[in-house]
Image (cartoon, helix red, strand yellow):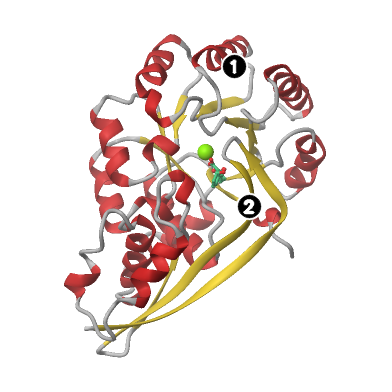
């Protein structure tokens, strides 16, 4: 049997993150601790991202508040699929309690990608991140006009050193025509271009259009919102998605199930943060270290006040 203690937290961003979903200025989450009958303790984090399809913070708090004072492993392993952030938080706490040390020594070998501020601020932000060792950057698009963002992207690519890689993330904010225009530019600048991939160009309900585009252009397309939870990821895999899968472990569901799927299916995965704290980040990077070779999207500490 287990007992739970938990604490909601808030982390304000230094500057609001502007994406096609809107403005996001504060990360709200829950830190939890499990204790078993042998006195072993395990820490976990619940970091919901409702606009990606996870539960809300309120739903996660309701779940935590309504667990009995002592509960069984069965109850821990039977959390609803409607609560993927809770599944991750309790699943990773269980792993840390039983000291399931995944290949954490690889964590240090991970390459990291830094999320740039949206718009022209990206041009002044990347040099300091370069000095800190980042060689992969992500730029949000699908927020301003196509012409404005394409000019910005061209300027950024002209400034970045040749060894840098750039990821473009539309958060589903393009339509088929503008996605095609972006892919023309991306393909047109290959092979010298540093554009690694175009992330979630179209809304989740346009899978077939993204599948068609993935066959028409060389630049890889990465699904993110479309594969936010493990059931969604499996669904897109079974529909034959040939491209990259962006995995946000903290909202994907049980880490055990995610590990199992990725170990048995050779998918091209990029592990990505949801701006969680060090507790959730540690659990996510333990997964990334053994399941992907691409830079991980956890270069976010510059988004928070020191
Ligand atoms: O993946 C990364 O490189 C950093 C994390 C990141 O970009 C995101 C985290 C959470 C919500 C989103 O706005 C955004 C994304 O779409 O990937
Ligand atoms: Mg994304």
Asked if ligand 1 lies within 8 A of label 2, the reply is: yes
Place of residue 17 in the rendered image (x, y in percent of width and height, measured from the top left): 66, 46
Asked if ligand 2 lies within 8 A of label 1, the reply is: no
Residue neighbourhood size for the residue with mark 2, other residues' Cα within 10 Å, grouped as few (<14), some (14–19), many (≥20) = some
Image quadrant in which the C terminus is located:
bottom right
The residue labelled by disc 2 is 300
- Residue at the spot 45% in from the left edge and 44% down from the top edge: 52
The numbered disc on residue 171 is: none
Q: CA distance from mark 1 to mark 2?
A: 25 Å
- Please, is residue 158 above or below residue 60 in the view? above
Q: Secondary structure at mark 2?
A: loop
Q: Is residue 208 visible?
A: yes
Q: Secondary structure at mark 1?
A: helix
The residue labelled by disc 1 is 182
Place of residue 270 in the rendered image (x, y in percent of width and height, measured from the top left): 46, 40
Q: Residue furthest right?
A: 124
Image quadrant in which the N terminus is located:
bottom left
- Residue at the spot 25% in from the left edge and 89% down from the top edge: 37
Please tell me how many numbered marks the rendered image carries: 2
The answer to which image quadrant residue 283 occupies is bottom left
Q: Is residue 155 left or right of residue 219?
A: right
- Say whether disc 1 or disc 2 marks the residue closer to the N-terminus: 1
Nearer the observer: mark 1 or 2; the answer is 1
Q: Is residue 175 left or right of residue 94?
A: right
Place of residue 195 in the rendered image (x, y in percent of width and height, measured from the top left): 60, 24
Q: Is residue 70 left or right of residue 189?
A: left
The answer to which image quadrant residue 297 occupies is top right
Contact, mark 1 vs mark 2 (Cβ under 8 Å): no
- Residue at the spot 42% in from the left edge and 70% down from the top edge: 61
Q: Is residue 96 visible?
A: no
- Residue at the spot 46% in from the left edge and 62% down from the top edge: 57
- Please, is residue 240 above or below residue 139 in the view? above
């Amino acid at each position: 049997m287990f007992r739970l203690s938990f604490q909601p937290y808030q982390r304000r961003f230094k500057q609001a993150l502007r994406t096609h979903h809107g403005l996001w200025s504060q990360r709200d989450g829950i830190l939890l601790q499990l204790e078993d009958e042998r006195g072993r303790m395990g820490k976990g984090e619940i970091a919901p991202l409702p606009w990606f399809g996870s539960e809300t913070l309120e739903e996660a708090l309701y779940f935590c508040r309504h667990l009995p004072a002592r509960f069984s492993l069965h109850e821990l392993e039977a959390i609803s699929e409607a609560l993927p952030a809770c599944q991750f938080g309790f699943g990773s706490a269980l792993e840390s309690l039983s000291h399931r040390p995944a290949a954490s020594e690889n964590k240090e070998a991970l390459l990291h990608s830094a999320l740039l501020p949206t718009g022209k601020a990206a041009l002044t932000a990347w040099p300091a991140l370069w000095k800190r060792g980042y060689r992969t950057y992500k730029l949000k698009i699908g927020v301003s006009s196509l012409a404005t963002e394409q000019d910005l992207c061209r300027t950024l690519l002209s400034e970045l050193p040749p060894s840098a890689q750039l990821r473009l993330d539309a958060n589903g904010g393009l339509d088929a025509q503008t996605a095609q225009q972006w892919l023309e530019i991306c393909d047109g600048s290959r092979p010298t271009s540093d554009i690694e991939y175009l992330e979630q160009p179209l809304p989740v309900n346009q899978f077939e259009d993204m599948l068609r585009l993935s066959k028409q252009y060389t630049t890889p397309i990465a699904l993110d919102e479309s594969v936010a939870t493990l059931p969604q990821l499996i669904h897109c895999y079974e529909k034959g998605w040939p491209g990259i899968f962006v995995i946000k472990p903290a909202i994907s569901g049980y880490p055990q199930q995610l590990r199992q799927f990725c170990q048995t299916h050779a998918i091209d995965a990029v592990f990505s943060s949801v701006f969680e704290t060090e507790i959730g980040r540690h659990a996510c990077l333990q997964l990334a270290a053994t399941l992907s070779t691409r830079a991980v999207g956890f270069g976010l500490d510059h988004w928070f006040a020191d």
